[in-house]
Image (tube, rainbow, N blue to C red):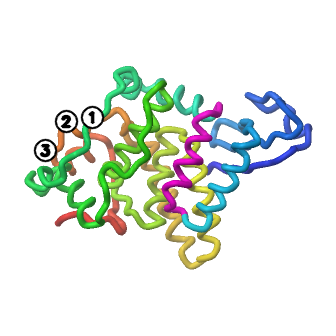
Amino acid sequence: MAAVVWICEPPKFLFQNLRRVEIQSANSCVLLINMPGDGLMLTHLSIADQLKTVQSFSILTKAPATFEAIYDLDEILRRTDLSTISIEYLKAQPGVAAMIEERYLAPVPNLTELLTYPQESLGYQFAHHLVINQFDPEFYRQREVKDDISYITLRRSQTHDIHHVVTGFGTDLGGELGLQAFQLAQMRSPIAIAILTAGLIHVLAEPQQLNDHMQRIFQGWEMGLKAAPLMAEKWEEHWEKPLAQWQSELGLTPTYTHLDIAA
């Protein structure tokens, strides 16, 4: 798994033999990320971003589902080389590259309409999931799409609950960590690393839950590596397709732990 560490005023010996490193100031904070298969990566943060990063990350270690802290942290990470690396990884996949080039975004789904679809359809199951949990389909922070990174950030938010439904990960903490591990495997997303790290720190206060959460993290990682890239799909144009068919075509093997799926 990935590991993440923030270091302020790090000793210079840490910079030796690191890729993508440029020492910009003695007063900078750095974000060290140990990515599986990619070695140790580092990115610099400005003074203002240091404070916001520490504040947001601290909030997430106490309450991992705090959306505003996630969005603030994501906004900072978007301005780092780590997001550029993630985009490069995604654009190496033809289906995802086509979505990025098109800037495909869908309108906000009409849940009332989707609930008229066949019960086995993705559309019905997605709407059922949102309605039973009293979720807003447009819960995410709105962003102007100015480049590849801002597009992927918005599209990832737009499809977040679709990914919950097709992967089977619930919206409890373990399910969110499982989905973040899945997205890390598929997207190399830096915000996924931050959420996973904060979530595991939070779990230390509830050690009886550690085994369950780790199991779902490993499940998400393995599923993400084996499945076709979810970011390549135009889900909203095929709401009528059965959920089971989507999963079969994409190579997904969900367990539906703590996720409300209509039987």
- Viewed as shown, does residue 45 lie left or right of 63? right
Q: CA distance from mark 2 to mark 3?
A: 8 Å
Where does residue 255 sit, x and y in percent of width and height? 34, 62
Kindly identify the amino acid type of the residue bearing the numbered disc 2: Glu
Q: Residue at x 27, y 59 (%)?
A: 130
Badge 2: few (under 14), some or many (20 or more) residues near its Cα, within 10 Å? few
Q: Indicate the quadrant where residue 82 lies.
A: top right
Determine the secondary structure under disc 2.
helix
State if disc 1 and disc 2 touch (CB < 8 Å): yes
Hey, what amino acid is under mark 1? Lys
Taking the image as shown, residue 248 lies to the left or right of residue 61, namely left
Q: Which residues are magenta?
A: 64-81
In what element is the residue under mark 3? Answer: loop
Residue 69 drawn above or below residue 231:
below
Question: Mark 3 = which residue?
Answer: 240
Mark 2 sits on what residue? 237
Residue 57 place in picture, x, y as percent:
64, 56
What predominant SS class does the magenta segment belong to?
helix
10 Å crowding of disc 3: few (<14), some (14-19), many (20+) = some
Indicate yes or no whether the magenta region holds residue 73.
yes
Q: Residue at x 39, y 20 (%)?
A: 101
Q: CA distance from mark 3 to mark 1?
A: 12 Å
Vertical relation: 171 (above or below) 142: below
- Which of the pair 20/224 is nearer the observer? 20
Q: Earlier in the sequence, mark 3 or mark 1?
A: 1
- Percent position of residue 259, x then y: 32, 65
Three-letter amino acid code of the residue under disc 3: Glu
Q: Residue at x 25, y 38 (%)?
A: 107
Residue at left offset 59%, top offset 61% = 60
Q: Is residue 74 or residue 168 the one in the foreground?
A: 74
